[in-house]
Amino acid sequence: MSSLAVTVVGHDRPGIIAAAADALATCGMNLEDSSMTLLRGHFAMTLVCAGDAAVEAVRAALEPLSASGLDVAVREVVPDPDVPAAVATHLVTVYGADRLGIVARLVGVVSEAGGNVTDLTTRLSGELYVLLAEVALPVGAAPGTDVDALRAHLEEVASDLGVEVTLRSVENDEL
């Protein structure tokens, strides 16, 4: 059994997800993890599927999407059993006027604290810029101490950027 990463990017239209999911199912590939969104009218999908089909067979099955103008990529991914899956423990929320460097500086603060961003979404609506980042903070960080220091550092950098930031813990659903 292999795991494959598939990305599909291009102008949005109805039926892209259905066509991709059908092609993968036809190959016997089970869709395990996925993320799909619209970015300024462009569809973007990243997924991991598992099954016995080879990379070339999956590429061939997805060829109709490529032929219709979408950028499709397929590559094998090898799970690393020594690297545990990162589970988001906190949510960083940013609101304010758009300006260059918001993501780089605030995500950089999280990285410096040993945190890993597991999901990030940004939106620009008029003059309002919104950033939502799910963050996995290091296991063993003393509750109430390291998180408070991270929150203070985020607020300091956000103040420099002229935006507002919050950091709060999140509950995770066990799957």
Image (cartoon, helix red, strand yellow):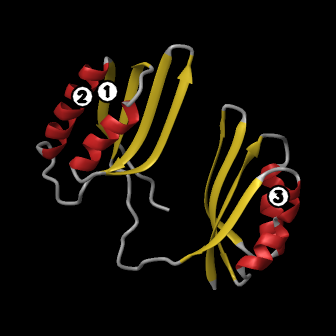
User: Residue 173 location in percent, x, y?
Assistant: 45, 54
Alpha carbon of mark 1 to alpha carbon of mark 3: how far?
40 Å
Q: Nearer the viewer, residue 137 or 125?
A: 125
Q: Earlier in the sequence, mark 1 or mark 3?
A: 3
Q: Does the residue at mark 1 contact the one at mark 2 (Cβ under 8 Å)?
A: yes
**The N terminus - image quarter:** bottom right
Q: Position of residue 34 (x, y in %)?
A: 62, 57
Give the side of residue 78 with respect to residue 75, left or right: left
Out of 98 and 150, give the one closest to the viewer.
98
Q: Which residue is mark 2?
A: 157
Report the amino acid beneath label 1.
Answer: Val
Q: Furthest residue to the top?
A: 127
Residues at marks 1 and 2, CA–CA distance in whole angstroms? 9 Å
Residue beneath the point at 40% across and 22% down: 95
Give the spatial CA distance, label 2 vs label 3. 42 Å
Of pointers 1 and 2, the one earlier in the residue sequence: 2
* Between 11 and 143, the one nearer to me in the picture: 11
Element type where label 2 sits in the image: helix
| Residue type at tag 3 | Ser
9 vs 112, left or right, is: right
